[in-house]
Image: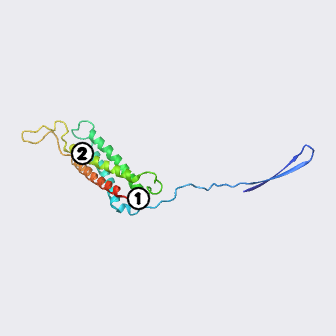
């Protein structure tokens, strides 16, 4: 956009001076800063690490659903501390697994987030998750038996436990899924250790 201004002023000696100024203004208002579109790793979801990652996420969702579906009713002694730890761990592992799935699917580990050591982080996270899932499978199995409930160890004269103790099938299946998740994370840790840097 060009603008021309003309000014006429009177000098001290009585003469008139005419000044013309020309202004050129340029606006850059349609400028947008953004990241370029990255590539998709379409084969990741069909590879062994991708399938294991998706199964980890689905198993974690089922574990949380199974534990929460029975959390509270029955002859329980207050809040179950072990199950609270299991729920917190499974929730955090679920979120981190989803982050790894997104990073590898959108190739963010090679484009926008290449400053982070994703392969090493993935290997360490999956190794620790496998270990904790195997431990929590036994913790959840213990809770599934119902033997921690009030007076559950009282056995009647017929040799059968009577005081409302029962096997909590939902928690037993959650314990089995914790064991499966431990195996899936072990597979993911192995695949992460074999991944090319």
Residue lying at the far left of the rendered structure: 157
Question: Residue 140 or 73: which is nearer the viewer?
Answer: 140
Left or right of 159 on screen, residue 60 = right
The residue sitting at 38% across, 54% down in the picture is 119
Q: Quadrant of residue 152?
A: top left
Percent of width and height locating residue 7: 83, 50
Left or right of 88 on screen, residue 146 = left
Left or right of 4 on screen, residue 50 = left
Q: Of the numbered discs in the image, which one, if any, rests on residue 78?
A: none
Quadrant of the rendering where the C terminus is positioned: bottom left
Residue lying at the far right of the rendered structure: 14
Please, what secondary structure does the residue beneath circle 2 have?
Answer: helix
Percent of width and height locating residue 190: 31, 55
The residue sitting at 21% across, 43% down in the picture is 142
Percent of width and height locating residue 78: 26, 36
Q: Which residue is label 1 attached to?
A: 105
Q: Which residue is label 2 attached to?
A: 140
Q: Is residue 65 visible?
A: no
Q: Residues within 10 Å of mark 1 (few under 14, many from 20)?
A: some
Q: Is residue 81 visible?
A: yes
Quadrant of the rendering where the N terminus is positioned: bottom right
Question: Residue 165 or 131: which is nearer the viewer?
Answer: 131
Q: Are marks 1 and 2 in contact (CB under 8 Å)?
A: no
């Amino acid at each position: 956009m060009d603008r021309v201004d003309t000014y006429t002023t009177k000098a001290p000696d009585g003469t008139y001076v005419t000044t013309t100024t020309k202004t050129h203004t340029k606006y850059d208002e349609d400028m947008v800063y953004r990241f370029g579109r990255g590539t998709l790793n379409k084969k990741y979801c069909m590879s062994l690490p991708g399938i294991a990652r998706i199964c980890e996420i689905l198993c974690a969702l089922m574990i949380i659903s199974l534990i929460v579906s029975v959390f509270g009713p029955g002859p329980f002694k207050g809040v179950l501390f072990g199950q609270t730890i299991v729920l917190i761990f499974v929730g955090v592992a679920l979120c981190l697994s989803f982050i790894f799935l997104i990073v590898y699917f959108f190739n963010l580990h090679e484009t926008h987030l290449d400053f982070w050591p994703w392969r090493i982080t993935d290997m360490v996270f999956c190794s620790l998750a496998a270990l904790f899932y195997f431990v929590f499978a036994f913790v959840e199995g213990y809770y599934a038996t119902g033997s921690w409930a009030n007076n559950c160890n009282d056995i009647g004269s017929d040799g059968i436990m009577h005081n409302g103790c029962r096997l909590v099938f939902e928690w037993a299946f959650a314990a089995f899924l914790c064991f499966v998740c431990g195996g899936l994370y072990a597979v993911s840790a192995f695949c992460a250790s074999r991944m090319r840097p």
